Image: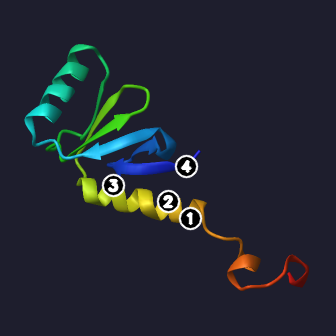
């Protein structure tokens, strides 16, 4: 399981994230309020301003104080590490050469 830092020491499973969105639109505010009303909201802002909303495949909604672009960059770097080629393939070698 690969974890992604969403700010202030909070980590979430990369494979569970469905969307990372900006909290400024009215539909997203309604989504957050609905999650709060149904006890599916996790506030990981550490008391700071909400800058991104993460929607999880479990139906939970997470609030983060980190910009969506920053979280997306962290997801990409984690994905790049997960799907990177083994050392022997990167160098164009055969497995026997290693």
Inter-mark Cα distance, 1 to 2: 5 Å
Q: Are marks 4 and 2 in contact (CB under 8 Å)?
A: yes
Mark 4 surroundings within 10 Å by alpha-carbon count, few (fewer than 14), some (14 through 19), many (20 or more)? few
| Horizontal arrangement in the rendering, residue 59 relative to residue 36 (left or right) | right
Residue under the point 44% across and 42% down: 12
Labels 1 and 2 touching (C-beta < 8 A):
yes
Q: Tell me, for residue 33, which label it has, or none.
A: none
| Quadrant in which residue 56 is drawn | top left
Tag 1 near tag 4, CB within 8 Å: no
**Residue 35: x %, y % from top left:** 25, 22
18 up-or-down from 38: above or below: below
Q: Judge whether 65 appears above or below 83 on screen.
A: above
User: How far apart are the two marked residues, 4 and 2, measured between alpha carbons?
Assistant: 8 Å
Q: Secondary structure at mark 4?
A: loop
Residue at left offset 27%, top offset 59%: 69
Label 3 packing within 10 angstroms: few (<14), some (14-19), many (20+): many
Position of 39 relative to 19 (above/below): above
Q: Which disc, if any, is residue 71? A: 3
Q: Which residue is mark 1?
A: 81
Expressed as whole percent of the image width and height from the top left, the position of residue 71 reads 33, 55
Query: Considering the image in quadrants, where does the C terminus appear?
Result: bottom right
Residue farthest along the top direction in this orientation:
38
Residue wearing tag 4: 2
* Residue drawn at the location 76% of the way across and 78% of the way down: 88
User: Residue 7, relative to residue 41: is it above or below?
Assistant: below
User: Which tag, 1 or 4, sits closer to the chain's start?
Assistant: 4
Is 82 in front, or is 10?
A: 82
């Amino acid at each position: 399981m690969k974890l992604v830092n969403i700010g202030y020491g909070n980590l979430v499973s990369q494979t569970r994230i469905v969307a990372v969105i900006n909290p400024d639109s009215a539909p997203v505010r309604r989504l957050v309020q609905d999650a709060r009303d149904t006890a599916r909201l996790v506030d990981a802002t550490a008391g700071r301003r909400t800058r991104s909303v993460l929607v999880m495949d479990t139906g939970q909604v997470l609030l983060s104080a980190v910009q969506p672009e920053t979280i997306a960059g962290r997801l990409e770097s984690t994905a790049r590490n997960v799907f990177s080629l083994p050392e022997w393939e990167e160098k164009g070698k055969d497995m026997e050469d290693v």
